[in-house]
Structures are given as structure tokens and as C-alpha cells.
Image: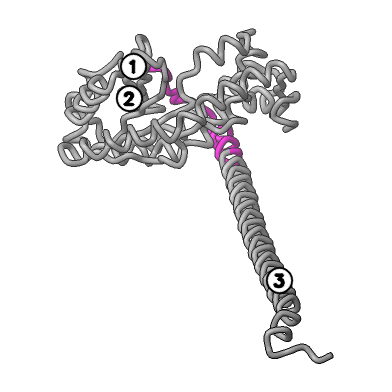
Amino acid sequence: MSEATGAWEGEGYELSPEQNRVITERWQRAAAARDRMDAMMKGVQEETAQSHGGKLEGLEYSLKDVDSFRRKAATALKNEEVPVETTARKVNDLNRYTLTFEPDAYTEGVERTYERLRESGYEPIPGKEKNTWQDPVYKGINTSWRHTESKEQFELQFHTPDSFKAKMENHELYEISRGSELDRLAAGDEKLAKSYQDAANHLQNERYKNVKIPPGQERIGEQLIRDKLNPRVPEEHVELIRRKEAEKHAENLAKAEAKAALKQAEQATLQVDALTQAETQSLSSRLAAKTVQEQLRQKAEASRTELLPTQSRGRGPSLK
């Protein structure tokens, strides 16, 4: 990646300096709102925890990674000719949160969360309440919210502990399915790319097979089935995607470790800088104190020197 305000490129996509500026500035506004929105969602979690056992998951990921946002904008620009200004304006998942409830408390917990957010001045964005509990590839409820006055937006997903676990385990498969990797693997063969997509769907579905669907969830949001399973997907295609998933997982793990190491190095540098500054200030203070002491000593010495003639004259008659 190039500089934040320069051109950007990654995974076959790119943004010009001006396009990158638009995307980066939108992300920076979301970053500035993060602490405030985190605090708001912690308050929602504390209330729903008492009433329905709600738990806030993945708070460390409450701000979308800036490069992920750039990639999203560049993908929409290249594949669908969507201007980056449109992506920046319509994006609602830069700030994002996940609440989980046990299956038997799930529906009432979600409904109470809706009430709590409305009391805080937020409303669900029309068309952004997707209930995919009947979908074979992704199960949960995804919603987006906008404040009625500030217009701040955020995404809120509702899961059970098991559906959240399956979603996290499927992360690499999701990346493979939604990116351009399947097209590259198929070398432009649309039929082959579709078969690879079916294989990815099959693998994602495996992790949802034992996830319990919460009773009453159909009351919430728009029921949506986005994917269908192909029972005749070739086993060799499934194994290929399984290997690609493992490779992607190793790649993501390496990136995470590198990012953590960089952050640790930055913190160490800040600590060294702070220590150096403190030592410099301490040395300056000691030098200043020494200078003052020396000035006082010199003044005292000067005073004693000035007093000597007067003291001599006061001891008795002058000798002539």
C-alpha cells in the first residue's frame, strides 16, 4: 500500500490519489466516532446482559480496517463502476458491532436491543434489516442503524454463540467467495468459477449444520436466502477450496502477527521517547537548579565582599 493520501493498490484493485483521499477521509470520520459509539454499545450490552444475557463480541474489531474499506471501494469501482464517492456516502459498516444471545433468549434480546437503540435516537436503516437464519451459508441477523440527528451510522449483527463461532471460522471462505480469487483460480472460465463458489458454499454450510435456529426469529427483519447448495459439486473442487482456505488463514495470521509486532514496536518507541523526554526534562531541571544555586552563591559572595570595608571602619578609629 502506498501513502494514505497517495495512490493505493491491493489484490488486483487500485485507487487513484484523489479516490483514496475520499475513502480515507470517510474512514477517519468513523475512526473519530469509534470511542463514543463503543461506549454507547457497551451501555446497550450491560442492559441486555441483565435482562437477556446479551454479550458484546469482537469489540476490538468495531472499526473496519482502512485497507478493507479501500478494497471494498476499489472492487465496487472496478466490477460495478460504482464511484468511490457513492461508496463513501452509503457505507454503513465502518463502525460495526455484534451482540450474541443464547437461542431461547435471542428473539426477545434482539427486540429489547431495538427498543434501547430507538430510545438513544437511532433508527434501523430501511432495507438494511436482513434475516438470514434460513440461509445455508450464513446464519444471523444483520442490521444497520442511523442516528436521527447526527446521521452517524453503524452495523449491528445479532448472533447466537454458535452462529458467531461458525461465522468467525468461515471468515477466510467469505473472503475467498467475495473477492476476485475464484475468478483467478478459474482463469476466466465462468462455469468453473461457479463450481468453486458452490464448493465454498458447501464448506461454509458444514459449520452451520449444528447451529440451533432461535425460536421466533422470523419476527425480525426481512427473511432472505442468498445462497443455495449444489449437492453435485465435485469433491476435487471442494478440496481445492479447502486448501485455499488454509492458505488464506495462514496469510491472515501472518498479517495479524506482523501488525501486532508493528504496534508493539510503535508502543516501545513511544515509551523510549517518553523516557528520553523525562530524562531530558530531569537533566534540564537539575541544570537549572544548579544555575540558580550558583547565582545565589555568587550573590552571597558579592555581598560579603561589599560588607568588608564597612565592617573595618566600624571597629575603631582609623590609624593614621
Q: Residue 299 carries which label?
A: 3
92 on left or right of 20: left
First reached walking from the N terminus: tag 2 or tag 1 = 1
* Residues shaded magenta: 224-244
Where residue 297 sits, quadrant-wise, is bottom right
Q: What element carries label 1?
A: strand
Give the quarter of the figure containing the N terminus: top right
Identify the residue position indicated by label 1 in the image. Answer: 129
Q: Residue 141 carries which label?
A: 2
Instruction: Report the residue at 34% width, 13% height from top.
Output: 148
Q: Residues within 10 Å of mark 2 (few under 14, many from 20)?
A: many
Q: Which amino acid does label 3 sit on?
A: Lys
Q: In this view, does 288 lie above or below 203?
A: below
Give how far apart the Cα atoms at labels 3 and 2 are: 80 Å
Give how far apart the Cα atoms at labels 2 and 1 are: 7 Å
Whether 195 is among the magenta residues is no
